[in-house]
Amino acid sequence: MLLLGIESTCDETAVALVKDGQIVLAESISSQSDLHAVYNGVVPELACRRHIDVLVPLLHETLQRAQCSLSDVDALACATGPGLVGALLVGWCAAKTLAIALRKPMIPVNHVEAHLYAAMMTSQTQTLDCTNSLGLVLSGGHTLFLHIEHFGKYSLIGQTLDDALGECFDKVAVMLGLTYPGGAKLEALAKSGDPDTFPLPLPKIKGRPYDFSFSGLKTAFMHLIAKLGGPNALTSCDRGDLAASFQKTAVNAIATVVERYLKASKDKPQRLFLGGGVTSNQALRRRLQTLCVDLEVHFAPRELCVDNAVMIAGLGYHCRHRSIDAAKNLAVRARWPLTEV
Ligand code: KG4
Ligand code: ZN
């Protein structure tokens, strides 16, 4: 079964053709980071306009790369939430139009569930075995810790109460003079630094052992830079040490919560699936691999950690029972908790 996937939830526009949930025939992706870098974050109105400009050319490019035509497509899968409403509407409009014109099913896909699926994709065949597992989605917009009873049945263990982890990486990166999105650039800078130079406070939330908070860490980092004489006074050595110290604390914040949960859980989970842009971070990967020795740990392949349409088309195959008649007015969802998929 060949699915055409469309992703436009935030600042990446992507189209992919994926067979049976796993075999990638082609993908085209267009990042908008150049557009938003000057604002140090995503400007929704600009994001929508760019999605409109690039979506149809990306569609043609993907079909051409796969040597396919639209008549080969069996169903459309589109990320219909969560995300920026205007951005979602662009992808949804394209998918809906194609579904109606081609008389094919349209499958609405939850973008966050797709980040988890990206971690399942390479290790699974036709059946998804994620019974009694844990999921961590760490991206620019989300920081979620989930229990997966089985595929499609999720419960929330914890989440961030303020900034998402990727957002915190991006803001701290800007303080170090790096351009948006700064997560991967901060990781590269951290390689030259000593993570023990600047101790930063580990976020703690009274009475909520499995939730996260990153705004305090961000503020502590801002004060630390001020104490060092401001951004212009930093040497390149300071910048490396600062990046490494921040990264160590951010990774510890995630690892501490996972460790606490594993210690407390009676029914030991079997696997941990990790997806979202931040899970491509090598320091995070190493730390969680070491921590979760008794679990199978599945990271999304690095190229599928950030937003992409492969994970949308891939998950769409497994969600084909959720398909809807595109002519009936399906709405996009800015918020779409995984408990409601
Ligand atoms: O999953 P994603 O594309 O976006 C959302 O769905 O929100 O993730 C993008 C986020 C950005 O905040 C980016 O800075 C961060 O992932 N990121 C990283 C790394 N690569 C991307 N953060 C830390 N280390 C990385 N290597
Ligand atoms: Zn995402």
Image: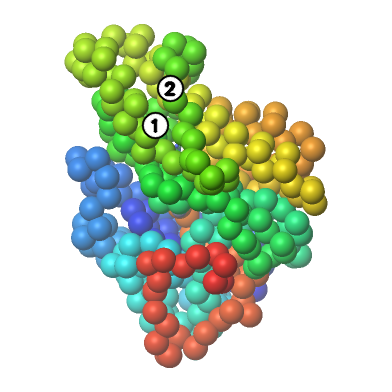
Mark 2 nearby-residue class (10 Å; few <14, some 14–19, many ≥20): some
Colouring:
rainbow
Q: In this view of the protein, can residue 64 be seen by the observer?
A: no
Q: In this view of the protein, can residue 299 be seen by the observer?
A: yes
What residue sits 42% from the left and 58% below the top? 14
Mark 1 nearby-residue class (10 Å; few <14, some 14–19, many ≥20): many
Measured in 3D between alpha carbons, the distance from the residue under mark 1 to the one under mark 2, in whole angstroms, is 7 Å
Location of residue 53 in the rendering, given as x and y in whole percent from the top left corner: 26, 62
Q: Is residue 172 above or below residue 193?
A: below
**Camera-side residue of 338 and 170:** 338
What residue sits 42% from the left and 83% below the top? 330
Furthest residue to the front? 207
Location of residue 210 in the rendering, given as x and y in whole percent from the top left corner: 57, 45
Q: Are marks 1 and 2 in contact (CB under 8 Å)?
A: yes
Q: Which mark is residue 200?
A: 2
Q: Which mark is residue 217?
A: 1
Find numbered disc 2 in the image and state the secondary structure of the residue it sits on. Answer: loop
What residue sits 28% from the left and 19% below the top? 225
Amino acid type, mark 1: Leu
Disc 2 C-beta below 8 A from ligand 1: no
Ligand 1 picture quarter: top left
**Camera-side residue of 204 and 224:** 204
Q: First in sequence: mark 1 or mark 2?
A: 2
Amino acid type, mark 2: Leu
Location of residue 242 in the rendering, given as x and y in whole percent from the top left corner: 38, 18
